[in-house]
């Protein structure tokens, strides 16, 4: 599975094509699916352009995207730093009226088990985000781990060798626990493409988009998310072929 991460916490200072408004996300979602993505991950924004978990902002983004690409699974972030930040952000999550298909939950965050319990209660899928071996060990110790939609290995290291080392250490923990969940692997910025290639090699799910980086493998700047995704499709085809 190839997932498009359209915007993340980036701003237009990072890339002029970054989607923020519901209309922009809907347009970008259609282009991303047309380029070969199968699922979407977005960070809804408020009218001030900042990340938001408020029901109206989440609903506006999801409804616009679903009108543009009906039937495509759409997930959103639950980052600790999204206003009102910390445990206080659980309050707007409880008030969501339009529900995402899934959310990403970072196991490094203090209230990750609480967020997971809330999502299970609301019948929303969970991507369990792991950036370290400690995150992986925390996940596999949770009774709710097997109820996740997938595991998301998120490599933050910026050197390929270091990133691969962490990824394989996390995979070893997951394999030992035998959760049987789909696994997605992605890097960021300098390791976006090396982790993509490793995901292809291992037969794991992949993630590409402006949230994770704006450069193509040759170091040139991509025009938009669609160009990044078309490149990922070509690279995966070459590797498999």
Image: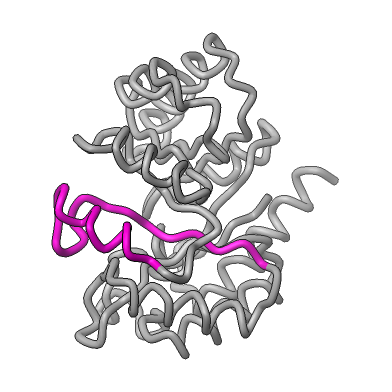
Which quarter of the figure has residue 32? bottom right
Q: Nearer the viewer, residue 38 or 74?
A: 74
| Residue 231 in view (yes/no) | yes
Colour logic: one colour
Q: Is residue 141 above or below residue 163?
A: above
Q: Position of residue 221 (x, y in %)?
A: 44, 73
Going by the picture, which residue comes out furthest to the top? 176
Q: Nearer the viewer, residue 90 or 42?
A: 90
Q: Is residue 145 above or below residue 204?
A: above
Q: Position of residue 186 (x, y in %)?
A: 48, 45
Which quarter of the figure has residue 235? bottom right
Q: Position of residue 193 (x, y in %)?
A: 51, 50
Going by the picture, which residue comes out furthest to the bottom? 23
Which quarter of the figure has residue 167? top left
Q: Is residue 165 above or below residue 65?
A: above
| Residue 217 in view (yes/no) | no
Relative placement, left or right, of 76 versus 78 is right
Tally of marks: 0
Relative placement, left or right, of 2 versus 148 is right
Q: Nearer the viewer, residue 108 or 7?
A: 108
Q: Nearer the viewer, residue 81 or 212?
A: 81
Q: Which residues are magenta?
A: 72-96
Q: Position of residue 118 (x, y in %)?
A: 37, 44
At horizontal 85% and vertical 46% (from top left) the residue drawn is 241
Q: Is residue 81 in the magenta section?
A: yes
At horizontal 26% and vertical 70% (from top left) the residue drawn is 51
Q: Is residue 74 in the magenta section?
A: yes
At horizontal 35% and vertical 34% (from top left) the residue drawn is 131
């Amino acid at each position: 599975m190839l997932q498009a991460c359209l915007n993340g916490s980036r701003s237009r200072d990072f890339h002029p094509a970054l989607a923020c408004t519901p209309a922009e996300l809907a347009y970008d979602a259609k282009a991303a699916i047309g380029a070969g993505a199968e699922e979407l991950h977005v960070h809804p924004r408020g009218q001030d352009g900042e990340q938001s978990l408020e029901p109206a902002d989440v609903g506006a983004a999801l409804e616009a995207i679903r009108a543009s690409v009906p039937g495509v699974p759409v997930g959103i972030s639950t980052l600790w730093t999204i206003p009102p930040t910390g445990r206080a952000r659980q309050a707007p999550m409880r008030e969501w009226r339009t529900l995402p298909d899934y959310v990403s939950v970072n196991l490094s965050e203090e209230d990750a088990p609480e967020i997971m319990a809330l999502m299970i209660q609301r019948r929303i899928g969970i991507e369990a985000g792991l950036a370290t071996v400690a995150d992986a060990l925390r996940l596999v110790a949770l009774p709710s781990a097997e109820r996740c939609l997938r595991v998301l290995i998120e490599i933050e290291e910026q050197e390929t060798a270091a990133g691969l080392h962490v990824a394989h250490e996390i995979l070893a923990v997951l394999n030992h626990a035998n959760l049987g969940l789909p696994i997605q692997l992605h890097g960021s910025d300098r390791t976006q493409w090396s982790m993509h290639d490793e995901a292809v090699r291992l037969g794991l799910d992949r993630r590409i988009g402006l949230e994770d980086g704006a450069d193509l493998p040759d170091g040139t700047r991509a025009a938009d998310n669609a160009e990044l995704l078309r490149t990922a499709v070509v690279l995966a085809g070459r590797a498999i072929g």
